[in-house]
Amino acid sequence: MTAHRAISGAGIGLAVCLLALLPLAGLPAFYDSFLYIVFYWISLATSWAILSGFGGYFSFGHAAFFGAGMYTTATLSVKFGVPFLVTLPAAAAVAASLAVGVGAIVFRLKRLRGELFALLTLAVSFILATIILNTPIDGGAGILTSSVPLPHIMPSPSQTIYLLGMLMCVGTLALAYIVAHSRLGLGLYAIHDDEDVAEVKGVPTFRYKLAAFAISAAIAGAVGGVHATYVGFLTVSETFGITVPLYVVLMSVLGGARHWLGPAVGAALIAASLYTFTSGDQAMIGRGLVALVLIVAILILPDGIVPSFLRWRARWTAQRATAPLPPVEAPQPAATPSGGDRPANAQDSGIDRPVALAIRDARKSFGGLQALRGVTLDIHEGEILGLVGPNGSGKTTLINVITGHFPLSSGEIRLGGAPIQALPAHEIARRGVARTYQIPRPFMHLSVLDNVAMAAAFGSADHGRAASIEEARRWLDFTGLRAKESALPAELNLHERKFLELARALSAEPQLLLLDEVLSGLNPTEIDHAIALIRQIRDRGTTIVFVEHLMRAVVELSDRIAVLNEGTLFALGEPGSVMRDPRVVSVYLGKAHAA
Amino acid sequence: MTRTAQPWRRRHVLAGLAGALSAGFAATSRAAPSGKPVRVGSTLSLTGPLAPTAIIHKISGEIAVEMINKRNGFLGRPVEWLLLDDQSKPEVARSLYEKLITVDKVDLITGPYATAPILAAMGVAQRYQKFYVQNSMGIPKHLTYEMAFPATPFGSEPDKTFPKVLLDAMASTATPPKSIAILTSKFPSAQFMALGTREVAKERGLNVALYLEYEFGTRDFGAMAARVKDANADFLWVGSLGLDSNLLLEALKKLDYAPKRHFHLYPAPGPLALSPDGDLALSSTFLEPAPPFLDRPDVPELAKEYKERATKANVPYTELDAQGAGMYSQWQILEQAVNGAKSLDDKAIAQWLKKNGATTIYGKLRFDGPFNHGDPAQLVKQVQNKKWVVVWPTAFAPPGVKLIAP
């Protein structure tokens, strides 16, 4: 594997060197120019995809960062005589600063996701264009950059621009590859699919989005800096027009915005198509034909060329396998010390052990609705606490405030003695709190393996990329999903999705596991399987809060039961006594059932 | 890829027939061009936002090439125009010029349409030391390449010279304006002229009651119309492009305000002339298909042929205007410079042109001033009876036509 990587690395290095020396091969200079344009679009489209493709924050404002870079280079080199190469880092820095400034505000606001973010970035572009147009930066007259002296890196200026464009492109692709295969990339993919879940699973979403935005903008800015000298004359209307945002979106979507190489493939194809029909007599028909081909390609391959190709290759490889994989049985959980019975005494249940989670007077309001009205509850290390109550009693809200998904209105929550109620959700996750969702919320574009691996990577154990894959496989074995590790969540049935939720939560190696109706919708056999698994988890020392409506499971599994009603702790105690409490029967189970 | 002007092939046949028949075919009295074609490459924005104007250039250029080939071509050889589509993108224009020079290996190049593509292509021409003539660059000071030539007589400082022409026209009226309101797009060439007009107006003692800039692409002129109405200047100068003028006049009409006199820099000629609000609107031109210009060689044929082809191509305004005329002038300059220099060598062509100038449908042009520009020849035209007519200087107005100044 290492030798293979070394050979691949040497091959790539050689290819880059050859590409760098291409202008010296004696080809007509047009090819320098043509290839520069291809590199230019690859860099721009790939940079766009780092935030918008990986992270799902669709931006229509890429022209703002590209334009900021163009005008930085133009202003510094033309008006202040700064050497051209020095202006490029400045162009990147200005664009990145702009992105950080914008991101620091908009990424804090949940309502600015999706189309609102797209529109906001477009507005940023317009605002920046207006500022540049109405200040001496441009003032409307444009900036002539054709006379900016270029460094003599290559024999001719066009060859120098080619080389800069190529280096920019190679650097961008390398950066995209690194990001895609790093924790940042994994976090961005999770953000793309479900940002709230990503945060709860330990992804520092704000920081990651900001980092992706800054990287994306910095590349666009540097590319803009080089391009300023290529076009020779800058005007606000052309720089901040719709061409750049429209083309980068189109290129990324065509190639596959979620794959590091996808935008490059899309960009290369579309940039090449710009030169396919340039003859004066074919111009209109040619443009129409290219547009038609693009529409058809996007309709046929909605996920983009690269992901579609990779899926096709995976299917083809699977079909060529000589023997089918043996059916994998879900592993039968080992017998637990407590067997099928609930713990016999308080010593077994662990309530004499230290408090793992202390909730004090927890209150949560949504406008006029008080979902939690002062809940005080201790959860002890190693116990299984059954949390029950009628619909709307505050069970899921309590889980949400423990995990930091919702901030508390007032009160205090301590994990291992330390207050956590003011911490962001990802920090709480890092401290060892994991949860499942009543309705499974897997990351729909990540494979089963990656779903679990990302939770392992961002959980309390702080696994690296390789270790997190190993850890994920361990938990997929545990939950019986190993055979489906390459599947997407959409290919799983409800039972499997519930177990995926479980595997994902477990891979974070939590101290405290919050299971929100993990058994709902399962058939009796599946429920037995799940109960056995939960016992095994507890046996590993994990504290479990178990929200469930299925009374058989609650009684069977719980050391204690807490009953919530209308946002208050209504009853708490050993399962038998709580379930016999007439008030609980009346409020929760109903008199007819009790009778 | 290659677009060949077809008639030269027919000319071989016609030439043969002419020899066998009589000398009655005046058009064939000269030797038809023959031999290897001289290939001239250029781009136009045939697709993209600049396409509506570029089609005018294309029609006019095709006519020009056909007429050149009806004469003697270049150096007795037929001319072939290799026209590519730059898609209204300066970066594409630049790379296509490199393609024309290094791959297609054209003999000569001419410029594209619009400031940004012209400047992008000029850099390529400079690197390869190619003779470069263009016709629509409104900011002469940017033409810093020593072999770049204008085909339209803006003069080297149109921001100073044309405002004088225009204000001379205004001063000639019975009630010369005492105040001026200037409203301009922030499009570089329009803003350039607006700033110059403001300075000249001040020099002439006019009160600049309003100076306002708006962004290129603006469609809502309501707020600006209110400012114009409030200023209520004697003369409204609009640095407009395309339909800006129509939109502004409509916005003014909604405010029950009609400007006393109004000038529009680069309007869409048809829509403004035909609009009820455009009556007596003023604009700039270099030539109109009317006397006395119809007395100039080539103009009647060009105007007639242009109208036919523009109608066929569904061009909204089918009369020959400054855009079409500029393109024709560009080819005339190239023809005279090549044949005058008796060479396809770019430097020889440039030297000959700089020394001798050229006579085009714009008259005698010189190129010995700053940025290779000669004397300005910008005129003032006005909408009268829904047609554009030259009104100033009076020597260029058709018989019986006068500037109407309410």
Image (cartoon, rainbow, N blue to C red):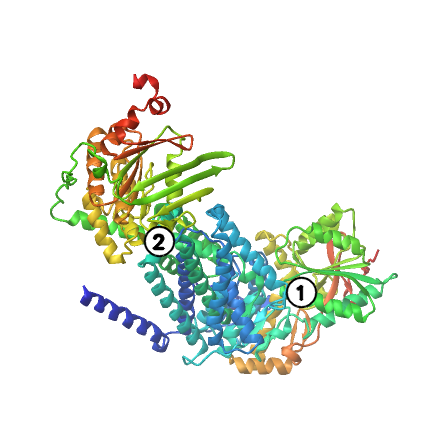
Quarter assignment of residue A166 = bottom left
Image point 24% across, 28% down: which residue? A552
> In this picture, is B111 found above or below A366?
below
Give how far apart the Cα atoms at labels 2 and 1 are. 48 Å
Image point 49% across, 69% down: which residue? A91
Which quarter of the image is occupied by the C terminus of chain A? top left
- Which labelled disc corresponds to residue A187? 2
The image position of residue A374, as x and y in percent, is 43, 37
- Chain letter for mark 1, please: B
> In this picture, is A292 found above or below A66?
above
Quarter assignment of residue A165 = bottom left
The image position of residue A212, as x and y in percent, is 41, 58
Q: Secondary structure beneath disc 1?
A: helix
Q: Amino acid at mark 2?
A: Gly
Please give the count of numbered marks on the rendered protein. Answer: 2
Q: Amino acid at mark 1?
A: Gln
The front one of B371 and A442 is A442
The image position of residue B28, as x and y in percent, is 57, 68
The image position of residue B53, as x and y in percent, is 59, 59
Q: Which residue is mark 1?
A: B191
Image point 39% across, 45% down: which residue? A413
- Which labelled disc corresponds to residue B146? none
